[in-house]
Amino acid sequence: MHVCVGTPTPGATKIWLTRAGGCVLAHNRGQIPLHDLSEIMRILEAQHAYICSQWKRYFLTDSISFIC
């Protein structure tokens, strides 16, 4: 998923959700301060199941492919 401060851009910071319920920073091209980035990733991990359920609902699918 892409995350940013303000208006989304093609170079926004990218975070991957993992199969195990965590997340991994792909890149921080959006230059989000590390303290804020850590908090964002903590929230994404806490909401992993909800995010995945909404992804499935939005894309009308029963499965999600994870990079890792």
Image: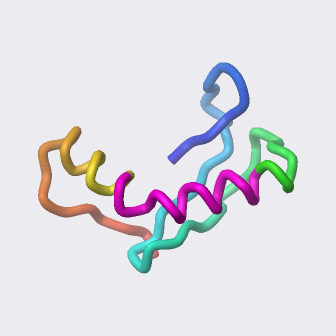
Dominant secondary structure of the residues highlighted in magenta in the image: helix
In what quadrant of the picture does the C terminus appear?
bottom left
Side (left or right) of 3 relative to 65 = right
Residue 26, above or below 14: below
**Residue 10, quarter of picture:** top right
Residue 10, above or below 45: above
Color encoding of the figure: rainbow
Residue 15 is situated, as x and y percent measured from the top left of the image, at 59, 55
Residue most extreme to the top: 7
Residue most extreme to the bottom: 20
In front of the other: 7 or 67 = 7
At 56% from the left and 42% from the top, the residue drawn is 2
At 19% from the left and 44% from the top, the residue drawn is 57
In front of the other: 35 or 63 = 35
Answer whether residue 45 is magenta in the image.
yes
Residue 41 is situated, as x and y percent measured from the top left of the image, at 64, 59
In front of the other: 34 or 29 = 34
Side (left or right) of 67 relative to 13 = left
Instruction: Please count the marks in the image.
Output: 0
**Residue 31, quarter of picture:** top right
Residue 3, above or below 67: above
Residue 56 is situated, as x and y percent measured from the top left of the image, at 21, 50
Residue bounds of the magenta highlight: 37-50
At 67% from the left and 35% from the top, the residue drawn is 4
Residue 39, above or below 23: above
Answer whether residue 10 is magenta in the image.
no
At 75% from the left and 50% from the top, the residue drawn is 28
Residue 47 is situated, as x and y percent measured from the top left of the image, at 46, 57
